[in-house]
Image: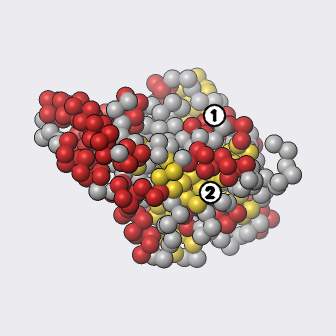
Amino acid sequence: MPAVVIVGAQWGDEGKGKATDLLGERVDYVVKPNGGNNAGHTVVVAGEKFELKLLPAGILSPQVTPVIGNGVVVNLEALFDEIALLQARGIDASRVRISANAHVVAPYHQVLDKVTERFLGKRAIGTTGRGIGPAYMDKVARLGIRVQDLLDASILRQKVEGALHQKNELLVKVYNRRAVEVDEITEQLLSYADRVAPMIVDTTELLNTALDRGEVVLMEGGQATYLDVDHGTYPFVTSSNPTAGGACTGSGIGPTRIDRVIGIVKAYTTRVGAGPFPTELFDEWGEHLQRVGHEVGVNTGRPRRCGWYDAPMIRHAQRINGFTDIVLTKLDILTGIEEVPICVAYDVDGTIYRDMPMTQTEFHHAVPVYETMPGWTEDISSCRTIEDLPANARAYVARLEELAGCRISAIGVGPDRSDTIAVHDLLPAPSDPR
Ligand code: GDP
Ligand code: IMO
Ligand code: MG
């Protein structure tokens, strides 16, 4: 022990990578439990910027063993490209371990992702186009290829055959695309087998025995609560469970072993892709947050949609995930705004909701009810304690804490690892009661 989970509380890009990196030096294993190379986690260490997509950000800490958990869908080409990029920058990637049970994203998944989006027309999700949805569809349909299948060429071929039997019908008859050859896919996947084989382990065993020895395991969730296929703004979600429960399933660590669940919360709200977003701003304030916050998707280069802080969303996320702590990020981006609005409720066709409404239709109709807090103009990027913050920034943080129903244990005041105010330790002391 201990096991700690990091979860995005909004629609992604809250700063999960930075929060993981912050704890990196005190952690032994960082496991990615869900998603794939649809994620984009940016970490800045001493001015040097790293962008992680498939690998957990923990790889930047030399003593950490980075683990790709069973809940992840792995694009092998993307994996080795990312490893090569990191190695070229002096990062040791030899410690990466991959679950034998993780699923593979095959080239036909990417094709299907793109054609499905086109087929949906104006109902498109705005996916990252990485084949994530189709790979998870195959996993659930029991037509998926697992990483362990690369260790057995004849099984691999049988599985590719089984998958393509159905896929080719779909590609040719529904989407008017060319059929995919079994040989081509099998050969392509097998071309990675020798390189990936030494990385494949029983990660559940690896992580649980590490916990038995008292080592620290951190689960670095990708995506976020409102992109969760069960709890998010369905159908405008990803195809995995990026919530705390999903971190258990996606890494094989039981819920009773989790000591902390840390929600990563941006001081305002952003979203990439389609779907409802009550506090979205279409005026100059939206442009302001987008520009000052450098809100551009790491993965696809799309500008992120921006809006004010949405307190009912965070309170609901707190419940779903059972946050023990919140890391509030990007507070510095709000500097210079005279009056900072906070959405505290929704007006849905004349009815006021203080919590998330039950249905998606109501959420689509939700008009934010704002309260405003006085802003601050002082540069806060060099603040390192809560007392260093201007009184109005402290009051903003205190109000968010009250509305979230959870303590704020760290505050981000800039992108660098060091641009952080520590309020409470994010890791439990060995003597802490569980
Ligand atoms: P993730 O996907 O949750 O890891 O978040 P991203 O890396 O996609 O997006 C967060 C962005 O904000 C990155 O560019 C980070 O470097 C940056 N960032 C994180 N925390 C802070 C902060 O406190 N202040 C500022 N200015 N930037 C931050
Ligand atoms: P990180 O880990 C923000 C969004 C996509 C799209 C929807 C479905 O960096 O926070 P998918 O390709 O997963 O089927 O796309 O989910 N999305 C993200 N948005 N941050 C992410 O990851 C995301 N991963 C997926 O934009 O709306
Ligand atoms: Mg991101």
Q: Is residue 355 visible?
A: yes
Q: Is residue 132 visible?
A: no
At x 65%, y 71%, the residue is: 418
Instruction: Find residue 425 and report its image quarter.
Output: bottom right
Q: Secondary structure at mark 1?
A: helix
Residue 19 is drawn in which quadrant?
bottom right
Residue 54 point in image, percent of width and height: 44, 55
Q: Nearer the viewer, mark 2 or mark 1?
A: 2
Q: Residue at x 14, y 29 (%)?
A: 173
Mark sitting on residue 320: 1
Left/right placement of residue 147 relative to residue 207 reads left
Please provide percent x and percent y for residue 336: 60, 64
Q: Which mark is residue 383?
A: none
Q: Amino acid at mark 1?
A: Ile
**Given contact means CB atoms under 8 Å apart, are the residues at marks 2 and 1 in contact?**
no
Q: Secondary structure at mark 2?
A: strand
First-in-chain label (2 vs 1): 2
Identify which amino acid the numbered label 2 is placed on: Tyr
Residue at horizontal 19%, vertical 34%? Answer: 168
Residue at the spot of label 2 = 29
In this view of the protein, which residue sits in the foreground, 286 or 229?
229
How far apart, in angstroms, are the residues tagged by discs 2 and 1? 25 Å
Front position in the image: 374 or 167: 167
Residue at image position (47%, 46%) is: 100
